[in-house]
Amino acid sequence: MRTGWYLRVGCAAAMLFGTALSAAAFDPGRDGPGEDAPLSSDIRALAPLPAPVRPSPAAMAPTSLSAPPGVSARLLPGPVVPPAANASAEDAFRDGTRLYYAGDRKAALEQLKRAAERGHPIAQWKLGKIYETGDGVPVNDAKAFEFYREVIDNHGDDARGTPQAAFVASAFVALGSYYLKGIETSAIRPNVDRARELYTYAASIFGDTEAQYRLGRLYLEAESSERDPRQAARWLTVAAKKGHPGAQAMLGQLLFTGDEGLPRRPAQGLMWLTIARNNATNAKDDWIREVQEQVFSVASENERRRGVAEAQDWIAKGGNN
């Protein structure tokens, strides 16, 4: 199963790398994976739903869960009931979710593991997130990696728009990040090429905004042999149009300064930086405000006026320029 999946990813990546990508090849109006499929209340409670096209401060506010952008951490209705010993995967997942929000992390973990052993992809994803962030357990990146890998081994071919698609895309992104840095005391070593393949798969097949942003960043890394500013601009543009503040800021800085094969567009760069600052509502977004202020301070008066005017026009039109 795993060998077949890695071959599919490799083929998909090779095809994508061999083709000149453009932002027009993607639908920037889509919010990402899973937006068309109705989710049950249990799934919505944990789902890593992508950021909206036109995020508001409330939409970008941090949640009580350490989850991908757009997660709504809501208590599930109904009493907590003792789980049955022979519960199905779906029943075990539902019980685990209720126990989790009731604050019983130990019992929740047992039920989520039971659901994961029965192949429940969302339970596997949630366990990966729990061990990655140390949510009620010691941080264990090796365990997190294995749970994420279970998700993509069994669901890497799932269609975009299915209820679990957002979780599958998030698992691809998580594995890509682990391959970028490696995991100490494990066999997972830094592998930039593998990380790029995983990001590319999630960004293109699932249309995942976070993957598109991280792929754009990866193409700008100075130490990468595949550094490609034009490719970075394409991916960052797709994510920026979907409302990703980090992608908007990085794209703005790239356009303002220019790069190899990418001429300067200072006014457009200031436009994206101004939009990014408007959407930067979290403490983790302080770097966006710093970059915007730095660029604004060195821009000419004409560049400032044009950039701010275009940003205001973009915001007024709801990001539909």
Image (cartoon, helix red, strand yellow):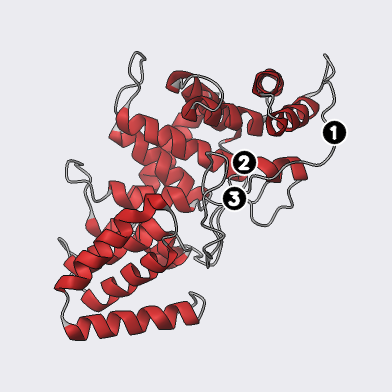
Q: Amino acid at mark 3?
A: Leu
Tell me what residue is drawn at x 25 percent, y 61 percent: 291
In which quarter of the view is residue 248 placed?
A: bottom left
| Residue 187: x %, y % from top left | 35, 15
Q: Which mark is residue 49?
A: 3
Mark 3, secondary structure of its residue: loop
* C-alpha span from label 1 to label 2: 33 Å
Q: Residues within 10 Å of mark 2 (few under 14, many from 20)?
A: some
Quadrant for the C terminus, please: bottom left
Q: Is residue 136 above or below residue 98?
A: above
Q: Which mark is residue 158?
A: 2
Q: Is residue 57 above or below residue 133?
A: below
Tell me what residue is drawn at x 37 percent, y 54 percent: 285
Q: Residues within 10 Å of mark 1 (few under 14, many from 20)?
A: few
Q: Which residue is mark 1?
A: 79
Task: Let me know if residue 46 appears in the view.
Answer: yes
| Residue 217: x %, y % from top left | 30, 50
Mark 1, secondary structure of its residue: loop
Q: Amino acid at mark 1?
A: Pro
- Label 1 or label 2, whichever lies nearer to me, is 1
| Residue 241: x %, y % from top left | 44, 66
In the image: residue 49, left or right of residue 246: right
Q: Which mark is residue 299?
A: none
Quadrant for the N terminus, please: top right
Disc with the residue nearer the chain's start (1 vs 3): 3
